[in-house]
Amino acid sequence: MGRPLLLTVVGAGVVGLSCAVALREAGFAVQVVAAEGPTTSEVAGGLWLPYATAADERTLGWAVTTYEWLEAAGHPLVDYLHMERDEPHWLGALPPGRLRAARAGELPPGRVRGWVARVPLVEVPRHLAALRERAGDLRVRRVASLDDVDGDLVVNCGGVGAAALAGDDTVVPVRGQVVLVRAPAAVPCLCDEDELTYVLPRPDVCVLGGTHQPGDADLAPREHETRDILERCRRLVPALERAEVLGARAGLRPVRRGGVRLEREGRVIHCYGHGGAGITLSWGCAQEVVRLARQA
């Protein structure tokens, strides 16, 4: 029996780490290579939601696979109130019994339409730490070219940086800023999609957002945006007036025109362009990467 194929995963965000874990579980030898510094995933709110993805027909299938995996792994499900002018495209991806129309008393003043979905809300730092424990060897270095990466196969999961490695100019960094607060008990989980205002009460911290700024790659939090996010969230949830503000963070969503690129090109498997849905699509995409790695 020959040695197992060695796969090198480039990128240590939630997509890269999920791919590494899935590949190890499938019997491959795996190492992860990533630049030092926080990933976009570390700034993510953690809600299962196919946000900022194109209309790729595969996307909802990956989202369903990830939903089932997150639930089976014990991540809490929350009643999430989604408000939007038009019906969201992802409603059909929810399991039976996990969706209903919002009742009038559940909607904030001035909102007339919404849906309540029972979805996973991931405590992101704990989830990433658990994936790192299971992902195998992690080497910290910056990758300038995929040709320089050792291994029988290379999995390109570098987020915004993956586009440069692949020579793909259809990827645009989309900046998102959030504010972290310590919220009072019973704060609802909700989002007004039309103005991108959301409240995500995780066990560790409550994440308030947000912004959507294409082409803006500045990772420094901006005080005026922090004030604006707090004002919008407090209008929706007045109880947040009493919330202690812990800080603000910004990250870059890797939004790709045409949606996620997940395909094999010689010895390279590309898996990037997940927009604002890295956590939502992570395990479904990782299973597809395993399938591609098994191809002769």
Image (tube, helix red, strand yellow):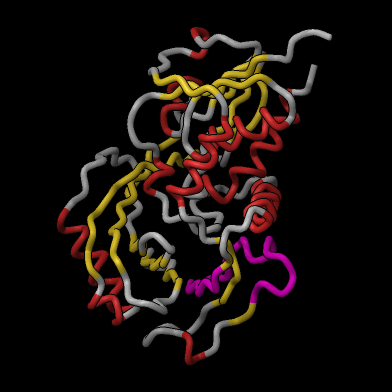
Screen quadrant of the C terminus: top right
Q: Is residue 98 magenta?
A: yes
269 above or below 60? above
* Residue 257 appears anywhere in the view: no
Relative to 291, is 261 on the left or the right? left
The magenta region covers 78-99
How far from the left and from the top, in percent, is residue 91? 64, 66
164 above or below 145? below
Residue at the location (29% across, 38% down)? 217
Spot the residue most to the right: 1
Residue at the location (45% across, 50% down)? 124
Spot the residue most to the front: 133
Quarter-wise, where is residue 200 in the image?
bottom left
44 above or below 208? above
235 above or below 156? below
In this view, the residue in front, 51 or 242, is: 242
Q: Is residue 108 magenta?
A: no
Spot the residue most to the bottom: 105
How far from the left and from the top, in percent, is residue 13? 47, 36
Residue at the location (51% across, 47% down)? 127
Relative to 96, is 135 on the left or the right? left
Residue at the location (32% across, 40% down)? 215
In this view, the residue in front, 13 or 163, is: 13
How far from the left and from the top, in percent, is residue 129? 47, 41
Relative to 203, is 18 on the left or the right? right
